[in-house]
Amino acid sequence: MRSYTNLAFKSSLMIFILLVFYFLLMRIIGLHTMIELRYLNFFILLGGIAYSLRNFLKTLGGKASYLESLGFGFMVSTISSLLFSIFMFIYLLHIEPSFMDFLIQNAPFGSYLTSVSAPLIIFIEGAASGAILTFVLMQYYKRSHISGS
C-alpha cells in the first residue's frame, strides 16, 4: 500500500485551520454560546474531505483503489478531528475555562462534561462524521474516478 500521510496531514491541517477559524470567528462575534452552530462543522468537514479526496485522486491520476481512497479519507478526518480536539482541550483548560462552565450548564448532558471528556467527544464526533462523509463521497468518486471499480 502506498503511503500518502504527507498529503493527508496537509489536508487535515487545512480542515483544522478552517475549524479553528470558524470557532474563533463565532467567539469574536459572540455566537460561540449558540451550541447548535457546532453542526456547521459538518459542512467544513464535508468540503475539506471532498477537496482532499479530489486532490488525492488527482495526484494518483485516477489509479487509486476504492479502499485506498476510503482509508485516505478516514485518515484525513481522524487527524483533523484529533487536532481540533487538542485545540479545544487547550482552549477549555487554559484560554477560556469559563466556557467549560457554560457548557456544563447549557449543553445536552453537560453535567457529565469535563475539560477532558468534551474534547474526547469532539474527537469521536468528528472522526465518526468524517468516516460517514468519506463513505458517502466515495460513492460518487468510485463511479467517476476510481480505477478497477
Image (cartoon, helix red, strand yellow):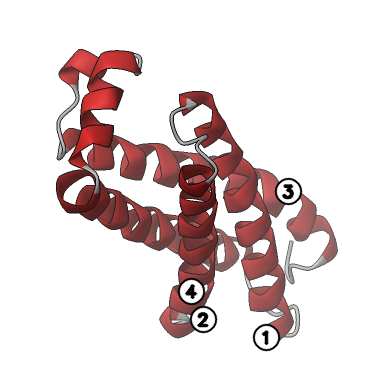
What residue is shown with label 4? 8
In the displayed structure, would residue 132 be above or below residue 19? Answer: above
Q: Which mark is residue 59?
A: 1
Q: Amino acid at mark 3?
A: Gln
Q: CA distance from mark 3 to mark 1?
A: 19 Å
Q: Amino acid at mark 1?
A: Thr
What residue is shown with label 3? 139
Q: Residue at x 57, y 51 (%)?
A: 45
Q: Mark 1 and mark 2 in contact (Cβ < 8 Å)? A: yes
Element type at mark 1: helix
Frontmost residue, 126 versus 1: 126
Frontmost residue, 49 versus 92: 92
Q: Amino acid at mark 2?
A: Leu
Q: Mark 4 and mark 2 in contact (Cβ < 8 Å)? A: yes
Q: CA distance from mark 1 to mark 4?
A: 12 Å
Q: Which mark is residue 7?
A: 2
